[in-house]
Amino acid sequence: MSPDGAQDTAQQPLLTVENVSKKFGGILALSQVSLDVFPGEIIGIIGPNGSGKTTFVNAITGFVKPDAGKVTFKGKDITSQEPHKIADLGLTRTFQVMRPYYSLPAYKNLIVPLFSPRARRTGGWRGGGKMGSRDTVAVDILEEIGFERDSYVPYKVASSLPTGYLKRLELARCLALRPDLIICDEVFSGLSMSEMASMVPLIEKLQMEGMTLIMVEHRLRELFRLANRVMVLNFGCKIAEGTAQEVMEQSDVKEAYFGSEEVYEYV
Amino acid sequence: MSVETRRKERIDRGIKVRSDGVYAISSWREMSYLMVPRLVFILGLLVLPLAFYYLPYWQRVISIICIYALLAISFDFLANYVGLVSLGGGFYVGVGAYIAALCNTKLGLSPLLTIPLSTVVGGAICTVLFLPCLPLRGVYFAIVSLMYPLLAARVIEALDIFGGTDGIFGVDPLPSGWVEQYILIVSVLLFAFGMRRIVDEDVGLVFRGVKDNDQAVKASGVNITTYKALGVFIASTMGCLGGACLVHIYMWAGLSQFALDFSIIPIAATVVGGGGTLIGPVIGSMILVPISELLRDFGTLRIAVYAVILTLFIVFKSEGIMNYATRKYEQFERWVEI
């Protein structure tokens, strides 16, 4: 493993996944997958459809109980913990299929995370200390993530918002908890080119502010711009890990991802 | 085949839009637009016992309406805001009734003490007993919650506790008919408007989140079981209050207080009145319970009439009276050419 400046090898990993396995009936969805995530890193997870990316995320965040293996977050064993306890420790995630509370205005969608024990402990957004009205804090978070405050967008009903904003809303829901690690399950999918172009700097900004992210993605071009390291899954097994370039030069990755005969540019 | 060339368009009335925010207080017209329907409802309920002053039988019916209204609000809240379709109404009533009866006959507490006591203690007992089924959702929770009243009645019968099949006799009545009716009417008003307030508060949004998208709520670090339990506590409190009042009205606690009527009629009232409105269920009970009384002579044929009313509403006006009336009050409709 060759870190590329973003982290220090002497540092303790923030998240350690050791030999996690999961079977669904006879299908081995994850087989002995291990991963170390260091503070401040962006890790990309790629792999063809059905390779176990989302199961991996679910296994870490407690939505699926792994059959074997161990997950450690900030030195605490979180294997098979309840999802809300894991989120309470500061490990939160977005969902691939967005399900905002459609009938509510966008900013009201953030009331639930702001009402959570963790948000009450950590006290609002950035400023720390006592929280103001949750509505104000919610609009602040939305502004931070690209909802223009002066427009009416934060106050619009979620069902009337385009996909780009809904994806940001998912991310905002995570940020409201002031987490230490966010796992983004395909935040780029379904976005237009311009929406993606504005999402990339947003994530860069989060990293610069010290956030650690794991990004599960199909959009390789954007992901490779962001990720410090990339892990490749295929049929539930980890087949490669390293920088984007290292990974893409491996022949089995090319084979798994692009087919065995012709190699053509994805995107 | 005819092609539809026009459709109905619904537009908010000007006065509705003007009275949406704080601007409503700028004129009497806007203020009365907001206040008149609420005042009609509140004053209407408060005047009911006076209106039936010379008809003592119907005064008793008012009390029964209020008990069903409490149960219907509790069903509406659990089903439409917490996502738990609960058929445990009979259980809530039974628990509240037995606690009130026991406190009154064994401890000698006055009805004015037993009612609040059994409301809170009964709510707590119901919540603890429902804890194991809270992970269930939808129809599974409905089935299990339906078992509770049946089970409780059989347990009391089999073990011959709390008076067994005879029940508990000699419960004190409430001081007067007026107290009885106004305790219930005021509780209905407090719960109806209180619950409407709660579901719009932050905690209410968490409840709604549990209903709409429990995964996102979990990922937000909120324990959904806690909020489901809180929801069941609030709902069972209403049922227990109804049960405690019922026991002092009949001066007797018995197995019939676990009857399925208390589970089923509130659902019918919610469908007729309009689910999700929390006021609709009260209106629904005010329609269904008197009909049921009028049809008392026909015996079990009442159930058939109920079934017909329910079916008609589900087929033709599934939104319910309250949602329909709100829409008419707030919006006007017109046909537009496509």
Image (cartoon, rainbow, N blue to C red):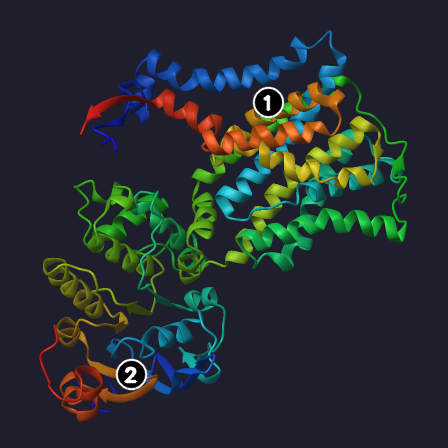
Query: Image point 66% across, 20% down: which residue?
Result: B290
Q: Quick check: can you spot residue A126?
A: no
Amino acid bearing label 1: Ile
Chain of the residue displaying label 1: B
**Residue that label 2 marks:** A233
Residue B274 spot, x, y in % from top left? 49, 31
Number of other residues with Cα within 10 Å of mark 1, as a class: few under 14, some 14 to 19, many 20 or more: some
Left or right side of B18 for A62: right
Dot 1 lies on which element? helix
Residue B330 spot, x, y in % from top left? 35, 23
Left or right side of A184 for B51: right
Left or right side of B110 for B25: left
Query: Image point 56% across, 46% down: which residue?
Result: B85
**Residue that label 1 marks:** B287
Dot 2 lies on which element? strand
Query: Image point 80% across, 21% down: which residue?
Result: B175
> Is residue A166 depicted above or below B90 in this figure?
below
Q: Quick check: can you spot residue B312?
A: yes
Query: Image point 27% across, 73% down: which residue?
Result: A216
In terms of depth relative to the viewer, which is nearer, A191 or B201? A191
User: Which quadrant holds the N terminus of chain B?
Assistant: top left
Number of other residues with Cα within 10 Å of mark 2, as a class: few under 14, some 14 to 19, many 20 or more: many
User: Which quadrant holds the C terminus of chain B?
Assistant: top left
Chain of the residue displaying label 2: A
> Is residue A87 depicted above or below B185 in this figure?
below
Residue B309 spot, x, y in % from top left? 57, 28
